[in-house]
Image: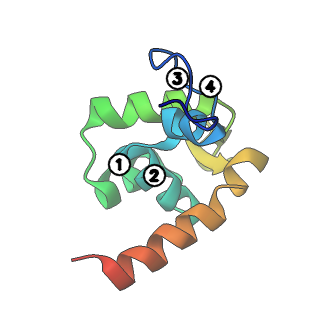
Amino acid sequence: MGSKTEPKDRGTARACPIADALDLLGDRWSLLVLREINLGHGRFSEIRVNTGAPKETLTARLRKLEEAGVIARRPLGKSAPNRHGYVLTDAGEDVRPVLAALHAWGEHHGA
């Protein structure tokens, strides 16, 4: 009953870019963080209020996305030299169509 399209060893996951992307971006908080930064809300306090993420969860997601090179921390400027905000990197910019597609899908099929 074998098929050429079935993996021979069912215990080994197939290498897949979708799975790789989901490992990094596939949870609610990561996508909502990217949504906020994409909309220009890059300060921790803005992201926290607009997503409703618990402080510890938000801190962990920001670190994970920064370590993966999807977002970067930047100083807010001379008026707040010790404060930082987040911006999308080139990799983060590449997520914009995914966010737009999720937004459109949610408007059409969401509750």
x 62%, y 25%: residue: 67
First in sequence: mark 4 or mark 3?
Answer: 3
Q: Position of residue 65 (x, y in %)?
A: 56, 35
Answer with the quarter of the image where residue 93 lies.
bottom right
Q: Which residue is mark 1?
A: 28
Q: Position of residue 45 (x, y in %)?
A: 37, 49
Position above or below: 66 against 90: above
Q: How far separated are the C-alphas under marks 1 and 2?
A: 6 Å
Q: Secondary structure at mark 4?
A: helix
Q: Which residue is mark 3?
A: 13
Position above or below: 15 against 9: below
Front position among marks 4 and 3: 3
Q: Position of residue 27 (x, y in %)?
A: 38, 43
Answer with the quarter of the image where residue 57 lies.
top left
x 69%, y 33%: residue: 69
Q: Residue furthest bottom?
A: 108
Q: Secondary structure at mark 2?
A: helix
Q: Secondary structure at mark 3?
A: loop
Front position among marks 1 and 3: 3
Disc 2 crowd rating (10 Å Cα; few below 14, some 14-19, many 20+) is some
Q: Secondary structure at mark 1?
A: helix
Q: Which residue is mark 4?
A: 67
Count of all numbered marks drawn on residues in the image: 4
Q: How far separated are the C-alphas under marks 2 and 4?
A: 16 Å
Q: How far separated are the C-alphas under marks 3 and 2?
A: 24 Å
Front position among marks 2 and 4: 2
